[in-house]
Amino acid sequence: MEKELNVTYVTLDWYVEVNKYRYVYFFIMFILYTLIICSNSTIVYLICIHKNLHEPMYIFIAALLLNCVLYSTIIYPKLLIDFLSEKQVTSYSSCLFQFFMFYTVGMSEFFLLAAMAYDRYVAICKPLHYQTIMTKTTVSIFLVIAWFVPASHVAVQAIASADAKLCDFNIKGIFCNNAVYTLQCARSRLITVFGLVCLLNLVILPMLFIVFTYTKIFIVSYRSCKEIKKKAAETCLPHLLVLMSLTMFFVYDIIMARVESDFPKTARIIMNLQIVLYHPLFNPFIYGLKMKEISKHLKRLLSQGNMISCIKAEC
């Protein structure tokens, strides 16, 4: 029976002094999770209710921020439960499901950023054809591809890992990322080969497309008038900032999975938290402050909130 439990369950063994600081950890992570959900949901709400934001660029931004909500929900609730638990244990099947969702949502962001890059390319380089190219059908196709392609790729990895024989039952991390591969006695050829296919299709090709597209945009903008240069800077800069942060954390995740096991626990936890903290937390601020139309509606919403507070205070 004990052996069966060992096969079924794995331990997340990189928590540091959870019993001593569990309520502190819980409170901090709960505040951060609430802030992520509220900030991302606010921008998505503004895009949904304002008709002038029902354009392809803003629809892709809403999809990206919705991804941040999903991304955080995959990680934070389990973290909060673990902080209040005596042992940080999860079933191997649940771990693989978290692995599947984490990388599906994470990789879909590269496709969404590629769709944004194409949208900006058409808007700046082919403005006369924008309405005929970026139709509702085109946007819908981009969104389906952005979520379906990563899901189909990562599913192969998760299914192959489900059948793998385990020789270790301790995950060196605070959630199930690609550290699940370290549990396997030997990584199968299917996982290794398809891992390279995933890297090529889900990361390298979208990034090359984005770089090529923005290069074309900047060349056209450089040769154009001041107004087009300003438009390119205002709309493309936030996308590039998000791309850089996403790429940095993706590379970071790969490196951390290959760092030797004697790496300090506290340092590893802090590093792992960067992956699930900065990206979903900063995205709404980047788009809320840098995108002119969203910023305008956000300021109006906040001013209305302050006005309502003042009226209630007077009453």
Image: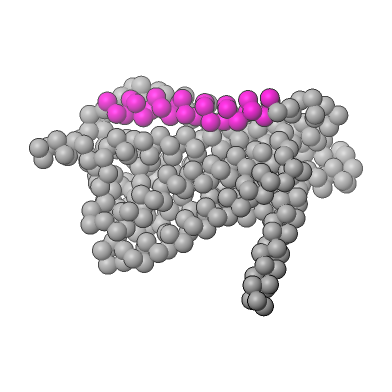
Residue farthest to the front? Answer: 315
Q: Residue furthest left?
A: 1
- Which residue does the image show at 36% across and 36% down from the upper left? 97
The location of residue 124, given as percent across then percent down, is: 80, 36
Q: Residue at horizontal 52%, vertical 26%?
A: 149
> Which quadrant would residue 108 be assigned to in this image?
top right
User: Magenta segment: does it hold 85?
Assistant: no
Quadrant location of the N terminus?
Answer: top left
Residue 131 is left or right of residue 284, and the answer is right
Q: Nearer the viewer, residue 214 or 8?
A: 8
Whether residue 22 is visible to the viewer of this picture, yes or no, is yes
**150 within the magenta span:** yes
Q: Is residue 164 left or right of residue 125?
A: left
x, y percent for residue 123: 79, 34
Closer to us: 167 or 310 = 310
Q: Quarter holding the C terminus?
A: bottom right
* Residue range corresponding to the magenta coloring: 137-163
Residue that lies at the very extreme toward the bottom in this rendered image? 314
| Count of numbered badges drawn on the protein | 0
> Looking at the rendering, which quadrant does residue 56 occupy?
top right
Whether residue 196 is visible here, answered yes or no, is no
Q: Residue at x 82, y 39 (%)?
A: 221
Q: Residue furthest right?
A: 225
